[in-house]
Image (cartoon, rainbow, N blue to C red):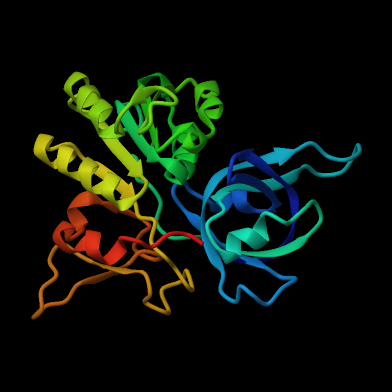
């Protein structure tokens, strides 16, 4: 984990309300794992006071500015403008100074790198799945299922396709891909690939539906929770969720920022999880 004082390299709108920010981040290539996140702070203003959590989309290198100089290592974040923090972020430009704390949290685990994988992303939940797909040795056995309310919510499809990942899109209004919910395609894919491992990130109603489908078929599922975090290091306890063995006599609370944000589905109390996370979004 590093508290990095750095600069923005670029900040571009890629779909209405969605932005892709590239940040100078030396050392992240060796530190970051798929599914981890960073806490972002704009240094030039007091409000918003708290850092904001964002999943890491990808890490890469820019060519040197001139011969003999080192490559520039960067990290990319993709965010949706939904509140005061992201309103400030979209006004940032090349050279603006910011702070990053990270990489943080527990990422995805890959027990069978060469096996079938199904990645399920809803809206901005697609972000942490890209590094996961990029890390897999056999992407021909990886399927990405993307869901959103409309065409505007379907982002970075081209990047996944360049990796060789087969993509399947649904929108609730039918403006792109199949009309309906992404869970319908998930059921079809699990009928065809019953031994696949499933990885998911997105809004809580989607995760709850994915968990029910995977549990009924006894399919292993890892999911990344989009919990609201204030500190990102487990100090404030603002992002806790209840574990599977939680009870009044024996409370079991799990910090999304330390023991997550990626969890195995069997670690969580799904009866209480929806109520504790519903309505919390990155802002």
How many numbered marks, from 0 up? 0
Q: Quadrant of the N terminus?
A: bottom right
- Residue 46, by quadrant, is bottom right
Q: Residue at x 88, y 40 (%)?
A: 65
* Residue 242 in the image, given as x and y percentages of width and height: 22, 67
Q: Residue at x 39, y 39 (%)?
A: 121
Q: Is residue 146 left or right of residue 67?
A: left
Q: Residue at x 30, y 60 (%)?
A: 278
Q: Is residue 121 visible?
A: yes
* Residue 67 in the image, given as x and y percentages of width and height: 91, 37
Q: Residue at x 63, y 60 (%)?
A: 87
* Residue 257 in the image, given as x and y percentages of width and height: 41, 65
* Residue 241 in the image, given as x and y percentages of width and height: 27, 67
Q: Is residue 145 visible?
A: no
- Residue 71, by quadrant, is top right
Q: Is residue 247 left or right of residue 207?
A: left
Q: Nearer the viewer, residue 135 or 7?
A: 7
Q: Nearer the viewer, residue 225 or 254?
A: 225
In the rendered image of this protein, does residue 201 appear above or below residue 225? above
Q: Is residue 238 left or right of residue 86?
A: left
Q: Nearer the viewer, residue 112 or 164?
A: 164
The residue at the far front in this view is 173
Q: Is residue 244 left or right of residue 263?
A: left
């Amino acid at each position: 984990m590093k508290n990095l004082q750095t600069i923005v390299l670029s900040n571009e709108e890629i779909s209405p309300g969605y932005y892709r920010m590239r940040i100078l981040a030396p050392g992240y290539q060796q530190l970051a794992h798929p599914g981890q996140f960073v806490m972002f702070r704009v240094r030039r203003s007091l409000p918003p006071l708290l850092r904001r959590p964002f999943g890491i989309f990808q890490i890469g290198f820019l060519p040197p500015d001139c011969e003999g100089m080192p490559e520039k290592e960067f990290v990319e974040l993709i965010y949706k403008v939904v509140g005061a923090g992201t309103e400030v972020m979209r006004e940032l430009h090349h050279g603006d100074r910011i702070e990053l704390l990270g990489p943080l949290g527990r990422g995805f685990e890959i027990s069978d790198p060469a096996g079938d994988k199904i990645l399920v992303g809803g809206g901005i939940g697609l972000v942490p799945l890209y590094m996961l797909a990029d890390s897999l040795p056999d992407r021909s056995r990886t399927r990405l299922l993307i869901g959103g309310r409309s065409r505007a919510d379907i982002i970075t499809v081209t990047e996944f396709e360049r990796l060789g990942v087969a993509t399947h899109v649904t929108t609730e209004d039918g403006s792109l891909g199949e009309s309906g919910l992404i869970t319908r395609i998930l059921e079809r894919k699990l009928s065809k690939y019953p031994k696949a491992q499933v990885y998911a990130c997105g809004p809580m109603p989607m995760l709850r539906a994915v968990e029910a489908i995977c549990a009924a078929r006894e399919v292993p599922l890892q999911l990344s929770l989009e919990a609201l975090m204030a500190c990102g290091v487990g100090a404030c306890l603002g992002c806790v969720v209840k574990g599977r063995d939680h009870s009044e006599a024996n409370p079991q609370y799990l910090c999304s920022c330390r023991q997550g944000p990626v969890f195995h589905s069997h670690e969580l109390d799904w009866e209480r999880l929806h109520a504790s996370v519903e309505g919390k979004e990155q802002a």
